[in-house]
Image (cartoon, helix red, strand yellow):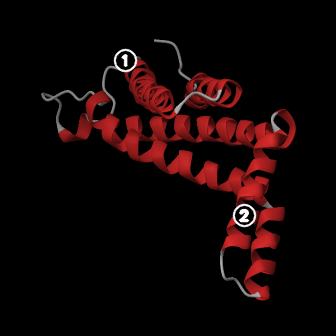
Amino acid sequence: METVNKWQSAALNGLLLSVVTIVYSLISTIFHPGTFVSVILWTIKFGACIYLLYYFMKQYSGMFETISYGESFRYGAILSVFSSVVCSCFAFLSITLLFPEQLDQSLAAMQSVIEAGNYNDEQIDAINQVSGKLPQIMLFWSLFYYSVFGVIVSAIIANYTKKTNPFAGEENSIQ
C-alpha cells in the first residue's frame, strides 16, 4: 500500500471543503437573495460541508485496513482547520478588497445603533475603536468559529469512519 501523507491530503481536501463556503458567500454577496432563499442556500451549504467532511474522512479511512477513532478524528480536525484558514482569509479579503461596501454597510449599521442608543462618550469611543478593527476581528472570529465547528463535527463523524478489527487483540490494534 502506498504511503499516505495526512497533511497533504488534509490540505487539499480542506481547500475543496472551503470552496463550498466561498461559493455560498459569493452568491449571497453578489445576488442578495431574499430571506427565504438565503435560508435555503445556507441549509444547502451546511449540509454540503458536513457531507464533504464525512466523505473526505471516509475516503481517508478507506486507505487503511484499520483506523482508530482518534486517528480519524485527527484527520478531520486537521482538514477542518485548513478549510477554516482558507474560509477566514477569503472572508477578510472579501470585506477589505473584493466587496468593501459590506464593511461600509456594517459600519453604517454600527453608527445607527450608536445614534439610537443612550451611550456615554466612553462607550462610543470603545465602539469606534472596535469598528476600526472590524476586518481583523472578523478574520479571527471566523477562524475560531469555523475551526471549532469543524472539530465538533469531526468528533461526531469519526465515530462512523473508524475501522477496527474485532478479532484483533489489544496489542494489535492501532491507538
Nearer-N-terminus badge (1/2):
1
Residue found at the very far left of the displayed protein:
167
Task: Identify which amino acid the numbered label 1 is placed on.
Answer: Gly
- Residue 101 image position (x, y, % from top left): 81, 41
Residue at left 40%, top 39%?
154
| Neighbour tally class for label 1: few under 14, some 14-19, many 20 plus, Cα within 10 Å | some
Where does residue 170 sit, x and y in percent of width and height?
Answer: 20, 41
Mark 1 in CB contact with mark 2 (< 8 angstroms): no
In the image, is residue 32 above or below residue 104? above
In the rendered image, the quadrant that contains the C terminus is top left
Between the C-alphas of marks 1 and 2, the distance is 54 Å
Left or right: residue 136 versus residue 48 is right
Q: Secondary structure at mark 1?
A: loop
Seen in the image, is 163 located left or right of residue 7? left
> Where's residue 27, x and y in %?
63, 24
Outermost residue toward the right in this view:
97
**In this view of the protein, which residue sits in the foreground, 145 or 97?**
97
Above or below 108: residue 49: above
Query: Can you see residue 175?
Result: no
* Extreme residue toward the front, this view: 116
Q: How many numbered dots are placed on residues in this image? A: 2
* Residue at the disc numbered 2: 112
Instruction: Count residues near mark 2 (Cα–Cα under 10 Å), then give few for <14, some for 14-19, many for 20+.
Output: few
Residue drawn 47% across the image and 42% down it: 150
Residue position marked by numbered label 1 in the rendering: 62
Q: Amino acid at mark 2?
A: Ser
Question: Who's the residue at 62% across and 37% down the image?
Answer: 82
Q: Is residue 16 above or below residue 87?
A: above
Q: Where does the N terminus fall, quadrant-wise? A: top left
Give the left or right position of residue 145, taking residue 161 as reference.
right
Taking depth in this image into account, of 69 and 25 the one nearest to the observer is: 25
